[in-house]
């Protein structure tokens, strides 16, 4: 039984796939496995994956004839393995040295462990970085109320915790919803300050399409509300709905939504004062940034 199973669903990713695979296999421990799933690609993705699988015994290749979607693919890959730890990798990103050893070390004391990322453009040139500093298990839930503060492609997580949660849900923000659900149920989530992934921004990636903006499933709202109630106590459901909408959507917002977000920022600031000093400083930095964004966001 491998200690680590890295899961990577892939769909029409030929442009960056070789680079992603090279970096993943170069950093993957010898006693780990990489489970790939081609989700009905129509380009040369499957051929590239088959070539890699023929050269390295650590690779397990799965396939869908037609696309089934990200949450189906992720759950299928996770369920196919029996490792103690599950890692996640995206087909357009690059693993940095020490990626998996750092993740495995972090999951000795955490249910889910993330890292910061180095942001790169389509050509692979650095264009920025995450908010600085580590986020402790005490601080992460507060950051999640203000949006998805961790990057899916950097996660390593204990299989037992993942299975207890029931896996990914069918929602446009399957990653954010899982983190919210974990935090609301007492999961220990951390983020290290050292980047372990070069996160590529390009016009074809899912985050540019933002599928969660048209998501009408109630599960994301339910998980967000559960975490808000855990940290802030009971609140108005419509208020929480506006706050979730604002932290997951771009563009103009209504005056009522603007006011709801301002109240959320005030609540988070007031209720998080018992955090350790570094956590409090980094959360205040985030709150100030969100206040600035709110002040400059157009009103619909």
Image: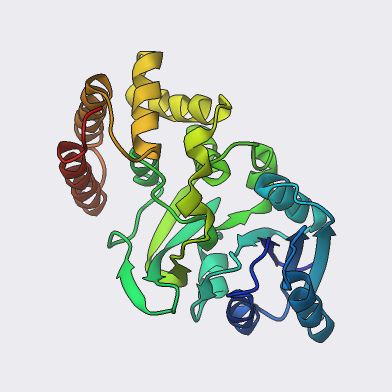
Q: Residue at x 73, y 45 (%)?
A: 72
* Residue 279 seen by the camera: yes
Q: Nearer the viewer, residue 115 or 146?
A: 146
Q: Nearer the viewer, residue 157 or 110?
A: 157
Q: Residue at x 17, y 39 (%)?
A: 291
* The C terminus - image quarter: top left
Position of residue 63 in the picture relative to residue 155 (left or right): right
Where 188 sits versus 126, above or below? above
Query: Residue 220: x and y, percent?
Result: 52, 31
- Which image quadrant is residue 255 in? top left
Query: Residue 280: x and y, percent?
Result: 22, 46
Q: Nearer the viewer, residue 110 or 30?
A: 30
Q: Residue at x 26, y 50 (%)?
A: 279
Position of residue 234 in the picture relative to residue 154 (left or right): left
* The N terminus - image quarter: bottom right
Position of residue 135 in the picture relative to residue 124 (left or right): left
Q: Tell me which colouring the rendered structure shows.
A: rainbow
Query: Residue 211: x and y, percent?
Result: 53, 42
Q: Residue at x 63, y 53 (%)?
A: 158
Query: Residue 227: x and y, percent?
Result: 44, 30
């Amino acid at each position: 039984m491998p200690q680590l199973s890295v899961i990577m669903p892939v769909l029409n990713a030929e442009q960056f796939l070789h680079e992603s695979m090279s970096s993943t296999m170069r950093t993957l421990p010898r006693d780990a496995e990489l489970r790939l799933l081609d989700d009905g690609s129509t380009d040369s993705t499957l051929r590239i994956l088959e070539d890699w699988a023929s050269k390295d015994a650590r690779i397990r290749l799965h396939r869908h004839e037609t696309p089934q979607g990200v949450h189906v693919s992720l759950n299928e890959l996770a369920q196919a393995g029996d490792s103690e730890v599950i890692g996640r990798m995206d087909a357009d990103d690059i693993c940095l040295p020490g990626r998996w050893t750092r993740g495995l070390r972090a999951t000795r004391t955490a249910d889910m462990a993330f890292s910061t990322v180095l942001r790169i453009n389509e050509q692979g040139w650095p264009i920025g970085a995450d908010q600085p500093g580590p986020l402790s298990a005490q601080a992460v839930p507060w950051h999640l109320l203000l949006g998805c503060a961790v990057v899916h492609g950097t996660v390593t997580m204990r299989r037992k915790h993942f299975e207890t949660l029931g896996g990914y849900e069918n929602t446009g923000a399957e990653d954010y919803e899982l983190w919210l659900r974990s935090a609301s149920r007492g999961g220990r989530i951390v983020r290290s300050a050292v980047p372990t992934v070069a996160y590529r921004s390009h016009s074809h990636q899912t985050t540019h399409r933002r599928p969660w903006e048209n998501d009408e499933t109630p599960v994301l709202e339910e998980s967000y509300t559960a975490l808000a109630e855990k940290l802030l106590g009971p609140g108005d459901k419509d208020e929480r709905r506006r706050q979730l909408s604002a932290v997951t959507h771009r563009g103009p917002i209504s005056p009522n939504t603007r006011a709801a977000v301002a109240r959320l920022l005030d609540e988070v600031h007031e209720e998080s004062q018992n955090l350790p000093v570094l956590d409090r400083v980094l959360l205040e930095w985030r709150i100030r940034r969100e206040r600035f964004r709110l002040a400059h966001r157009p009103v619909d």
